Image (spheres, rainbow, N blue to C red):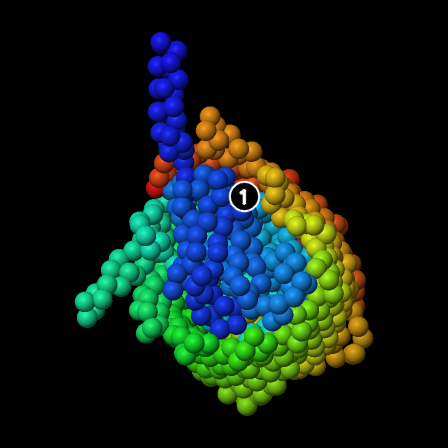
């Protein structure tokens, strides 16, 4: 009798235990990839759920897969007349819904070859005819070395070289400033803290919280016609919308600071129609002070960095009247470097006290509306503002000398841009996107700089730039996608740009062909002409009274021809091999008129010399990627790049560039373990190894430096010498604890776990009376706790 009661009790309680298991939801929307229109009647299933959880999209294209046990899922979408699509490795949490956007491609041939195709992976490149791929915030957080930063994550991809102390990335031998950042369809300033403080095109830590980051496209050459004013690559980032069903919050505390985010729905009523809008807000305060206390030798003066960022997005849907979005990112950074009182511990007989302050905000209003049944119009009005202030003085260990001002720099850059395009689907075999962009550019700059801030005496400051300036950049593009057959696709486009400041114009053709030779094999070929203007203050440089005023004002666009071949082999459902040979020819590159140095080798964010469009460059090589996506609790990414990078100056002789590393190898892998009594917790470990050739540099003429008691470079051997090869290790360990409606995460993330140092600069040491190569440590650990509720 008692045995029977026990069995009955267990049977009654079993549903309660099942119900108590942490579970979450996957929600999303399915659209036609060519027209942007919502698709109804799409079957959506979580293929590895048990029992299988599925749904069908309604008139708005939305679906919801509810009560999925915490874990990773693949979502598959199928509809008659369309190719199936898969979204893999979606992590379901108990504290926050996952929202995904899926685009289906119309099936132009109803035949066995089409029906046998396993489906398109939505995490591949946004455009299959160009080199690149998409990724999301979860990857940036999980992958070792990602550090929640899109730029640091991209450094694991083939053809990309990263640094340890900043997030600047060099794509296929190009400098990091040749990369373009785009947010919500508008070109933006680099959305990182302390942009350009170390070198042009880099920052310290991303200012864009992963809580806001949606799907991000990364292109690394020969990209489509809608992307202009870039030479090496494009980061095309979208911000996700807040949860439209219920409120979600998160809080975080780590050795780098604190943060808080909140999102959810709110209603707007008009004419008795209830509209559900959403909000998403995130604030973070970041400081390296705690790390400086723990690792003073490693962090150094960077311990005094203080960083604030506030990000938001509001989404206002209104049915057939379209959708309005309002978004923004605000950043305040400051750093004060102060010499210690004990001068005996100084490395040199002088120290440069410095104060840096940077304020930036990026924001805009977007509007998208369906037009007819096969088109949509999208417009964005946005503003970028950057305000930098740098003050520096040279102080001495001897009491006989007073501090000397060596830099007093301030600049305010403002751009106001309007971008619009219409996307039209003419049929299953042809779609077109045509639009234009108008960007107003304004600056107010005053640069006083000593010719050599690391020399005793440094020399009087010179006013290299003072005044205000403005201009405008106009661009227009059209690009069409043709499905020539089920196996063959071609993208053809044309971009034109006009720079009002000096009347320079350029026309750029783009073409890409993708041929699916079989279910597992595909070949792509892409060509593009690409151009880029320089920073606006470069055009207004005042070098000296003897030079021509605004000598750089008539600089033309920097230009390049880029050709890439792509071979794609889908070895298995989860393993993919990609081989990409490429060639890039750069020309009309600004170069110093009195030397052989071009902007290809430029490190500083400011320019103080006259320039002419006489430089050339060429980059060629091969990128190989073996990508094993998450399956059976593990994943790996192995990449190899072999390349050459050369540039020529006034003498026409081809020489090595600063970023000619010759080779880059990456091995990234990770595994997850399901733990806990109800399999409700996840332990994850990810590690990445990078082995790459060192940067090249200009050596010092030791004898001349000794005589002049300052650094004198030997330009006859510029970039012929190379720093030692680098073996860099990154590590990420996380433990997630899932409860009903809450998630707790403990993590350890380490950039450059072995503490390898990288080259910073040469400086003459007045103590030892020798020139010294200054190296800086790039190790950056972060230990933290995060809760979602």
Q: Position of residue 643 (x, y in %)?
A: 76, 62
Q: How many marks?
A: 1
Instruction: Tell whether 749 sits left or right of 412.
Output: right
Camera-nearest residue between 377 and 147: 377
Query: Which residue of the protein is positioned furthest toward the top in this rendering?
Result: 1
The answer to whether residue 19 is above or below residue 361 is above
**Residue 201: which quarter of the image?**
bottom right
Q: Position of residue 671 (x, y in %)?
A: 60, 38
Q: Position of residue 546 (x, y in %)?
A: 59, 85
Q: Which residue is mark 1?
A: 48
Query: Which residue of the protein is positioned furthest toward the right in this rendering?
Result: 653
What element does badge 1 sit on? loop
Q: Alpha-carbon neighbours of circle 1 within 10 Å: few (<14), some, or many (≥20)? A: few
Write the residue at 63% across / 79% down. Answer: 492
Write the residue at 53% across / 63% down. Answer: 80
Write the residue at 58% across / 78% down. Answer: 430
Instruction: Tell whether 537 sits left or right of 97.
Output: right
């Amino acid at each position: 009798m008692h045995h029977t009661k026990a069995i009955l009790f267990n049977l009654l309680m079993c549903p309660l235990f099942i119900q108590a298991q942490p579970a979450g939801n996957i929600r999303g929307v399915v659209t036609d990839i060519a027209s942007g229109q919502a698709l109804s009647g799409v079957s959506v299933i979580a293929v590895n759920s048990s029992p299988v959880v599925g749904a069908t999209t309604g008139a708005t294209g939305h679906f919801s897969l509810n009560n999925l046990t915490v874990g990773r899922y693949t979502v598959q979408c199928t509809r008659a007349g369309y190719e199936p699509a898969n979204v893999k490795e979606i992590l379901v949490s108990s504290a926050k819904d996952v929202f995904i956007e899926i685009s289906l491609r119309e099936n132009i041939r109803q035949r066995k070859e089409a029906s046998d195709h396993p489906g398109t992976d939505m995490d591949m490149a946004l455009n299959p005819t160009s080199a690149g791929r998409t990724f999301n915030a979860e990857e940036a957080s999980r992958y070792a070395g990602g550090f929640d930063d899109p730029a640091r994550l991209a450094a694991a991809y083939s053809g990309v070289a990263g640094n340890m102390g900043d997030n600047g990335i060099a794509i296929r031998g190009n400098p990091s400033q040749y990369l373009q950042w785009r947010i919500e369809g508008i070109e933006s300033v680099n959305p990182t803290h302390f942009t350009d403080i170390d070198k042009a095109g880099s920052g310290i830590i991303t200012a864009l919280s992963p809580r806001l980051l949606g799907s991000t496209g990364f292109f690394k050459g020969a990209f489509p016609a809608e992307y202009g004013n870039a030479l090496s690559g494009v980061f095309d980032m979208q911000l996700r919308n807040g949860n439209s069903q219920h409120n979600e919050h998160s809080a975080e505390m780590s050795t780098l600071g604190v943060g808080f985010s909140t999102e959810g729905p709110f209603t707007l009523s008009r004419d008795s129609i209830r509209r559900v809008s959403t909000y998403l807000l995130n604030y973070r305060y970041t400081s390296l002070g705690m790390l400086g206390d723990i690792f003073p030798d490693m962090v150094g003066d960077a311990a005094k960095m203080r960083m604030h960022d506030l990000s938001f997005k509001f989404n206002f849907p209104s049915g057939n009247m379209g959708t309005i979005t309002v978004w923004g990112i605000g950043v305040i950074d400051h750093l004060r470097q102060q010499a210690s009182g004990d001068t005996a511990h100084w490395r040199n007989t002088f120290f440069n006290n410095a104060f840096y302050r940077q304020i930036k905000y990026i924001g805009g209003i977007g509007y998208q509306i369906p037009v007819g049944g096969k088109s949509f119009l999208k417009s964005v009005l946005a503003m970028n503002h950057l305000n930098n202030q740098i003050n520096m003085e040279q102080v001495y260990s001897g009491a006989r000398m007073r501090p000397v001002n060596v830099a007093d720099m301030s600049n305010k850059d403002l751009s106001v841009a309007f971008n619009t395009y219409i996307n039209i689907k003419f049929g299953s075999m042809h779609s077109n996107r045509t639009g234009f962009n108008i960007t107003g550019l304004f600056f107010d700059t005053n640069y006083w700089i000593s010719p050599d801030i690391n020399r005793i005496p440094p020399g009087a400051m010179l006013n290299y730039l003072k005044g205000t300036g403005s201009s405008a950049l106009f661009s227009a593009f059209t690009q069409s996608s043709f499905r020539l057959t089920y196996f063959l696709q071609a993208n053809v486009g044309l971009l034109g740009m006009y720079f009002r400041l000096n009347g320079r114009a350029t026309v750029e053709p783009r073409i890409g062909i993708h041929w699916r030779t079989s279910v597992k094999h595909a070949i792509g070929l892409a060509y593009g002409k690409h151009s880029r203007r320089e920073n606006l203050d470069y055009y207004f440089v005042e070098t000296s009274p003897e030079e021509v005023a605004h000598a750089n004002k008539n600089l033309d666009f920097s230009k390049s021809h880029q050709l890439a071949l792509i071979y794609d082999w889908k070895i298995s459902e989860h393993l993919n091999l990609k081989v990409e040979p490429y060639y890039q020819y750069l020309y009309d590159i600004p170069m110093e008129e009195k030397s052989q140095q071009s902007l290809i080798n430029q490190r500083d964010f400011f320019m103080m010399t006259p320039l002419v469009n006489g430089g050339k460059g060429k980059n060629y090589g091969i990128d190989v990627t073996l990508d094993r996506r998450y399956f059976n609790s593990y994943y790996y990414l192995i990449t190899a790049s072999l390349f050459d990078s050369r540039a020529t100056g006034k003498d026409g002789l081809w020489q090595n560039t600063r970023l000619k590393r010759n080779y880059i190898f990456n091995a990234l892998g990770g595994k997850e373990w399901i733990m806990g009594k109800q399999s409700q917790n996840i332990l994850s470990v990810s590690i990445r190894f990078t082995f790459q050739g060192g940067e090249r540099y200009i050596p010092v003429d030791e004898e001349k430096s000794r005589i002049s008691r300052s650094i004198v470079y030997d330009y006859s051997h510029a970039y012929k010498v190379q720093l030692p090869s680098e073996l860099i290790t990154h590590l990420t360990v996380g433990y997630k604890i899932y409860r009903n409606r809450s998630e707790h995460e403990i993590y350890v993330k380490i950039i450059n776990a072995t503490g390898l140092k990288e080259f910073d600069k040469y400086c003459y040491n007045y103590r030892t009376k020798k020139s010294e190569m200054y190296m800086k440590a790039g190790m950056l650990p972060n230990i933290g706790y995060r809760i979602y509720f």
